[in-house]
Amino acid sequence: MRKLTSPQLKSSYDVIIVGGGPAGLAAAIGAKEAGAESILIVDREQKAGGILWQCIHPGFGLHHFKEELTGPEYAQRFLKQVEEEGVAVISDAYVLDIDKERQVTLMSSVYGMHSIKAGAVVLAMGARERTRGAIHTPGTRPSGVLTAGLAQKLVNMLGYMPGRRIVILGSGDIGLIMARRMTLEGAEVLGVFEIMPYANGLNRNIVQCLHDFDIPLHLSHTVAQIHGQERINAVTVAPVDDKLNPIADKGWEIPCDTLLLAIGLIPENELSRQLNLRLDPVTNGPIVNSAMETSMDGVFACGNVVHIHDLVDFVTQEALSAGRNAGEYALGQRRPGDNIRLVPGNGVSYCVPHTISTHQTHTVYMRVRKPHERCSITFGEVYEKKLRYAFPAEMITVTLKPEFLETFHGDALVVDVHDRE
Amino acid sequence: MNATLTHYLCIGCPLGCRLEVEDDGNDIVQVRGHQCKRGENFAKEEHKDPRRMVTTTVAIRGGELPRLPVKTAAPIPKNRMQDLADELHKVVVTAPINLGDVILANPLDIGTDVVAARDIAAV
Ligand code: SF4
């Protein structure tokens, strides 16, 4: 059994952070920068760092560290910095409740049940993978059907191969990365099937994880049926019509022993729901203001728990700022409230934060619903950003400066995407 | 030498231009399909000397985990990836290991070392 980190717990902290993944670690550093002195990270794993430990591929840190790192390297750098800053980290611990006075109840294998007062709280629980239930694939319920992320943990951390003949459903980055990973480990990846007419993952991963290993990508195709009693022994795959329903008579069967699901992530919001936070039905994450504060006073949120990010570097950026705001809040500094709502309009699926103010520069993260080339993003009449392209799989970042809003006196800005000639 | 026409998907940005490289068997004659310089350079590199970082794991004894993530210290020729991964399957190291430790020095003469990508403490 591994030794758990078990610092002496205090009865109160300036900032308590729920989750020790990339968002939680960066939030701690942000809070420290803002002047918070005592910071506690509550992590449910054996060691903080979150999903990064199992993401052994490169591609992390280009924005934040200006250097390309693997997931474990990124995690280790952050953990070291957090430790050097004197942040307390407890592992194998869960936050059960947070009350209106920010009294945080946690449960841990080392401390048992514990109640601690927080000046501010940051929710950084991350996301979990969509499972088969989310897509209702017909067929039997054999073993050998698992999420790509679980397979990644088994292979990369526990040294256990989930199978030898693999089919992958969904072209999200984790699926693409696992296609390469399983191939390098000696398995045969028979194909990646994506229901949409475009891939969900980065082109870099299409090239380096599929093309490099001659793994076929079938767009507008899905797994129509799963076969096998104890263990999966085949899937039926088929092209889909324009309503995304499989065209049965064009389907074919592929013998396989494993089906990996790479069909997306959903924010891990059990705690948010329990706290009755207002949630956004599109992102499935909490509604946040421009300080990344949720509908509960002094409770902030950042990272994949708010909306799914493409790159850990963006999580880091958002979490640093959420952490700073939480730190300021804990020290009693209050900023002017937001006075403008951002409303996703034509072709825009969501915007985060959900509200902004006129007194400072804001970074707005958003996604479009379908691919566009040569388009503009408009914020009401006040601001237009021209883009060469916009893809649903790529988060768009827009910087809104206070001067754009000088002549605006409404209380809601509609954000639209338009095609340009 | 035969003249060839080879296709690449540009990874420079999400537009994903389809690049076409015409080669007379000796050298690149023309790159087509790119919308910017980055795409042209990418096509040339991919055509002449495609390289990749390799990341995998090796077995580790006496550590807090049974697998140690490792990476090549520099990108290696693309066609050597599987050979290297197979070679690394044979390796067993003993904890403790520190990030950056050389696990194999220039294995299979690939021109770079394989190094540890994290610490793993002994238990
Ligand atoms: S050629 Fe230029 S525009 Fe086209 S995908 Fe590559 S980087 Fe993007």
Image (tube, coloured by chain):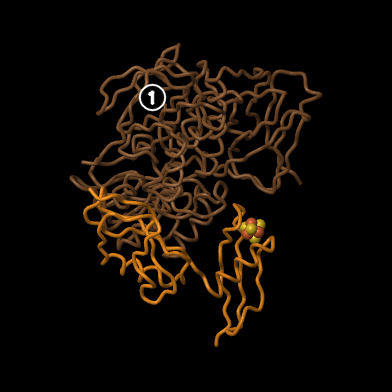
Chain colours: A brown, B orange
Q: Is mark 1 within 8 Å of ligand 1?
A: no
Estimate the x, y position of residue A51 in percent, counting from the top left.
Answer: 39, 42
| Residue B82 vertical position relative to residue A341 in the rendered view, above or below | below
Which sits in the foreground, A326 or A125?
A326
Question: If the image is split into quadrants, where does the N terminus of chain A sit?
Answer: top left
**Quarter of the image holding residue A338?**
top right
Ligand 1 rendered quadrant: bottom right
Estimate the x, y position of residue A239 in percent, counting from the top left.
Answer: 44, 50
Q: Residues within 10 Å of mark 1 (few under 14, many from 20)?
A: few
Q: Residue furthest left?
A: A230
Q: Residue furthest right?
A: A407
Estimate the x, y position of residue A6 in percent, counting from the top left.
Answer: 30, 32
Q: Is residue B69 left or right of residue B52?
A: left
Residue name at image x 45 percent, y 11 percent: A100
Q: Amino acid at mark 1?
A: Glu
Q: Which residue is mark 1?
A: A270
Q: How many marks?
A: 1
Which sits in the foreground, A63 or A257?
A63
Q: Residue furthest top?
A: A100
Which sits in the foreground, A136 or A288?
A288
| Residue A23 vertical position relative to residue A146 in the rendered view, above or below | above
Which sits in the foreground, A302 or A34?
A34
Q: Secondary structure at mark 1?
A: helix
Residue name at image x 35 percent, y 51 percent: B119
**Quarter of the image holding residue A33?**
top right
Q: Is residue A272 left or right of residue A253?
A: right
Estimate the x, y position of residue A389 in percent, counting from the top left.
Answer: 66, 47
Residue name at image x 37 percent, y 52 percent: B118
| Residue A406 vertical position relative to residue A255 in the rendered view, above or below | above
